[in-house]
Amino acid sequence: MSKKKPLILVTNDDGITAPGIRHLISIMKELGDVVVVAPDSPQSGMGHAITINDNLYCDPVKLKETEDHEEYSCSGTPADCVKIATQEILKRKPDLCVSGINHGSNSSINVIYSGTMSAAVEAGTEGIPAIGFSLLDYSLTADFEPTTKFVKAITKRVLEEGMPTGMVLNVNFPKLTEKQIKGIKICRQAKAHWVEEFDKRTNPQGRDYYWLTGKFVNEDEGEDTDEWALENGYVSVVPVQFDLTAHHYIKELNTWSLND
C-alpha cells in the first residue's frame, strides 16, 4: 500500500498571481498534494488582521496551470485565507502550511508586520506545522529559482520531523544566486527597528494626506542573527513562537503589590 501524500496548504500576502507564490506552488507539487488559498490582491503589511466587518469571498481559480491541484482566491487577509481554508475548503487538516515566497525580507522586527508570517502563525495556532518563506528582493521581477533547493530541503525536514506546538519557522533568503548562497543558518531574530517619518502631502482637492517613509536600523552586532546571516550570504531560519508572554518578567511584576 502506497503512503498517502502530505496535504500542503499554500498561501501568501502578495496575492495569488504573485511570482513568489507561483514558484512556491511548483516546488510544493513535487512534495505533496497542494491546495492554494491566497488573497485576491496584495496584502503586505497586514500583520495578523482578520475580516470581521465585511463580506468574505473565496472563489475557485480555474487555469491551465491549476488542473492538477485546487486554488482559491480570497478577498480577505492572509490570516483569513488560512482560517477559511481549514474551516471550509480542506477536507482534512493539512500536514503543512507554507506561506510566500514573499517579495522582500521578513527578518528581524518585520516579522510582526508581515502578512506572510501571520498566515504561517495562524496555521501554527491551529496545530499545523508552518513555514514562512521570504526573499530579500522587493522587485516583482525577482528571481526565485535560487531558493528552490533550500525550500525543498527545509520543507522535507519539517514534513519528516514535524514542529513543536506553538512554533513556526521564519525563513529568509539573501538576494544571491544558488552558487553564491553559503548555506543555511539557524538564527535568532535581530534587535532592530524602523526609524519612521510621515511625508505630509496635499492632494489635488486640497486635502492633506501622509505617506509613510523611513529607514531600517539594525542595532544588533551579533553573528547569530537573521540580519547577520542575510548580510553574509546565508539563508536564515528563525523558530518563531506566538506565545508573546514575557515569562522572565512575571516574577518582577508579582512584586508590584497591584492588589493593595
Image: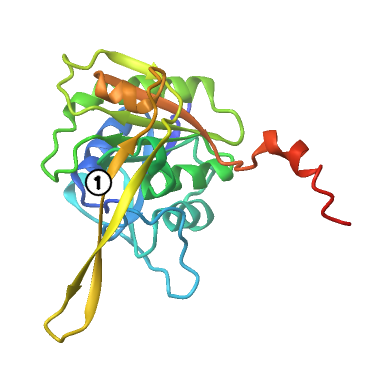
Query: Residue 188, how many percent across, how many down?
Result: 46, 25
Q: How many marks?
A: 1
Q: Report the residue at 28% width, 60% height from top.
A: 40
Q: How is the image coloured?
A: rainbow
Find the residue positioned furthest to the right: 260
* Residue at image coords 60%, 36%: 166
Q: Is residue 218 left or right of residue 26?
A: right
Residue 12 visible within the image: no
**Considering only vertical position in the picture, is 232 above or below 112?**
above
The kind of residue on which mark 1 rests is: Glu
**Circle 1: is it few (<14), some (14-19), or many (20+) Cα within 10 Å?**
few
Q: Is residue 231 above or below residue 210?
A: above
Residue 81, visible in the rendered structure: yes
Q: Of all residues shown, which one is farthest toward the bottom?
A: 205
Q: Quarter of the image containing the C terminus?
A: bottom right
Q: Which residue is mark 1?
A: 67
User: Disc 1 on helix, strand or loop?
Assistant: loop
Q: Which residue is found at the position 35% from the left and 24% from the top?
A: 236
Q: Is residue 212 above or below residue 179?
A: below
| Location of residue 111 (image quadrant) | top left
Q: Position of residue 47 (x, y in %)?
A: 42, 53
Where residue 37 appears, as percent x and y from the top left, is: 37, 52
Q: Quadrant of residue 245?
A: top right
Q: Is residue 37 above or below residue 176?
A: below
> As rendered, which of 160 and 92 lies closer to the eye?
160
